[in-house]
């Protein structure tokens, strides 16, 4: 499904919208001919990023040596209409936008990778959040550098440039929605909205497009920030990114529609260990995102995200549905694996290693773990034990709505009452045994008896 809630109803409607845009960017020549003014086009289509508008103008109109007339402009809008309509794994659109972002070139130097990612993130934040200032700040977020680092592994060894083909392959695996914000920006212009800039309040056409926002955040430092939210929105399955329960499945768009990520557990606030982790994370029935921060003895830092598409389970078995994912955020951003039955969380069984494991998919008899966290949360063993690091912080974020939290609280309350009820039964059983006549008869005969509960107390 594309970005638009509905296609332009007719050629007449499309022409009216394109004409409105043409009026915005055009001027009259001395001979009375109305043509596109390059600076006006660049300012309007670039919006918060003039450089993008400049590159887009070059990509669309460089071949025309004469002034850009209304017909040429309309043809360009029709081309952009296809580009702005998001389709999963649309390689042609990715390659087109790559050439725009590379200023008309078919390759991009390695040193310019961060700039490309910043533009992609900036338009997503403009269209999906209120963080306009953060989107275009002077400093480059660390996460952008981690994404560029992994992308740099795909540059040509000799030229130190990446081709649009290699970029498309990397994008499809690690960040398929990276360019979505740019497509949304173009769609907003082509559909007659926000033609005066990014501050327009009219966003009804966007089908509630919105990046997740955080709730129930503790006063302790958090690993989850705006750049990380954006990066995860580009590659997580949609079950973590909001849902539209009031619409048929066929109408649900294939991009984030806004949701709350509620903090369920923060090791800095709630304490370390598998027991504390499960106390705050169990009984939550919707998908969760777990962020892990680790330090190596060398001083290197690792950050991982475990996306779990079902409620947490305890036992000596593997579980999880097809949308469970393990993503490395730092030192370089990459999706490591996705798939069903890759998780095991064991607290009780002595016949199975205690702790939390995220496994690697395997068709053979040998089972390998990508990540194994010891029971006390002291250490993390990475990549089948090839490297061990110290676990510094853990956060769990619930991706459901308010009803998910309310349901979890009801379960917790029921469990607490059930524990109290069982304790009361055991206490009454002990008191009854102390007054039991059979006990007195046995003790008269020289047999000393104690209730099992009395032995526990001793």
Image: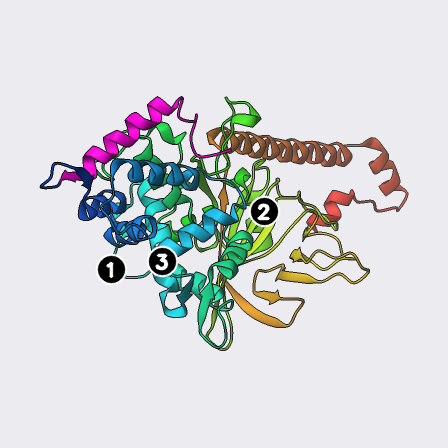
| Mark 1–mark 2 CB contact (< 8 Å) | no
Q: Position of residue 77 (x, y in %)?
A: 34, 38
Which sits in the foreground, 175 or 396? 175
Q: Secondary structure at mark 3?
A: loop
Question: Is 12 on the left or on the right of 344, as rendered?
Answer: left
**C-beta proximity under 8 Å, tags 1 and 3:** no
Q: Which comes before the other along the chain, label 3 or label 2? A: 3
Residue 6 lies in magenta, yes or no? yes
Q: CA distance from mark 3 to mark 2?
A: 52 Å
Q: Which residues are magenta?
A: 1-28
Residue position marked by numbered label 3 in the rendering: 104
Mark found first going from the N terminus, 1 or 2: 1
Q: Is residue 277 above or below residue 81?
A: below
> Could you tell me which residue is drawn at 53 percent across and 39 percent down?
238
Q: Which residue is mark 2?
A: 278
- Give the residue pinned by disc 1: 138
210 and 179: which is toward the camera: 179
Up-down relation of residue 158 to residue 458 (above or below):
below
Q: How many marks?
A: 3
- CB atoms of marks 3 and 2 within 8 Å: no
Left or right side of 35 for 249: right
* Residue 65, image x, y percentages: 26, 52
Residue 397 lies, in percent from the top left, at: 48, 45
Residue 48 can be seen, yes or no: yes
Magenta span contains residue 448:
no
Spatial distance from mark 1 to mark 3, Cα to Cα? 25 Å
């Amino acid at each position: 499904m594309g970005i638009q809630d509905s296609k332009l109803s007719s050629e007449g409607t499309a022409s009216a919208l394109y004409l409105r845009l043409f009026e915005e960017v055009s001027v009259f020549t001395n001979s009375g001919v109305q043509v596109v003014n390059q600076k006006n086009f660049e300012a309007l289509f670039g919006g918060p990023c003039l450089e993008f508008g400049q590159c887009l103008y070059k990509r669309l109109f460089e071949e025309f040596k004469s002034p850009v007339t209304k017909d040429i402009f309309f043809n360009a809008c029709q081309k952009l209409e296809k580009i702005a309509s998001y389709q999963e794994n649309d390689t042609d659109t990715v390659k087109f936008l790559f050439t725009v972002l590379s200023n008309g070139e078919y390759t991009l130097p390695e040193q310019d990778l961060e700039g490309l990612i910043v533009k992609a993130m900036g338009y997503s934040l403009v269209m999906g959040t209120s963080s306009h200032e953060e989107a275009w700040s002077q400093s480059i977020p660390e996460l952008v550098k981690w994404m560029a680092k992994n992308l740099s592994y795909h540059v040509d060894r000799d030229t130190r440039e990446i081709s649009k083909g290699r970029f498309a392959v990397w994008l499809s695996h690690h960040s398929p929605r990276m360019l979505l914000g740019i497509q949304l920006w173009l769609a907003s212009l082509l559909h007659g909205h926000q033609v005066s800039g990014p501050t327009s309040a009219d966003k009804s056409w966007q089908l509630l497009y919105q990046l997740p926002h955080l709730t129930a955040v503790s006063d302790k430092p958090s690993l989850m920030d705006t750049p990380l939210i954006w990066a995860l929105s580009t590659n997580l399955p949609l079950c973590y990114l909001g849902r539209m329960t009031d619409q048929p499945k066929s109408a649900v768009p294939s991009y984030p529609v806004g949701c709350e990520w509620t903090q369920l557990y923060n090791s800095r606030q709630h304490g370390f260990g598998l027991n504390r982790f499960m106390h705050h994370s169990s009984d939550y029935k919707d998908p969760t995102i777990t962020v892990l921060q680790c330090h190596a003895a060398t001083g290197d830092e690792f950050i991982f995200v475990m996306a779990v598409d079902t409620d947490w389970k305890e036992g000596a078995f593997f579980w999880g549905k097809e949308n469970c994912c393990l993503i490395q955020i730092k030192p370089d951003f990459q999706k490591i694996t996705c798939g069903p039955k890759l998780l095991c969380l064991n607290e009780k069984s002595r016949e199975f290693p205690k702790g939390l494991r995220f496994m690697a998919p395997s068709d053979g008899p040998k089972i390998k773990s990508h990540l194994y966290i010891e029971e006390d949360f002291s250490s993390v063993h990475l990549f089948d034990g090839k490297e061990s690091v110290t676990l510094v912080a853990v956060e769990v974020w619930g991706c459901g709505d308010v009803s998910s939290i309310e349901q979890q609280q009801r379960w917790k309350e029921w469990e607490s009452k059930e524990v109290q009820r069982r304790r009361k039964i055991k206490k009454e059983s002990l008191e009854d045994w102390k007054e039991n006549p059979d006990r007195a008869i046995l003790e008269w005969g020289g047999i000393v008896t104690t209730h099992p509960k009395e032995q526990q107390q001793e």
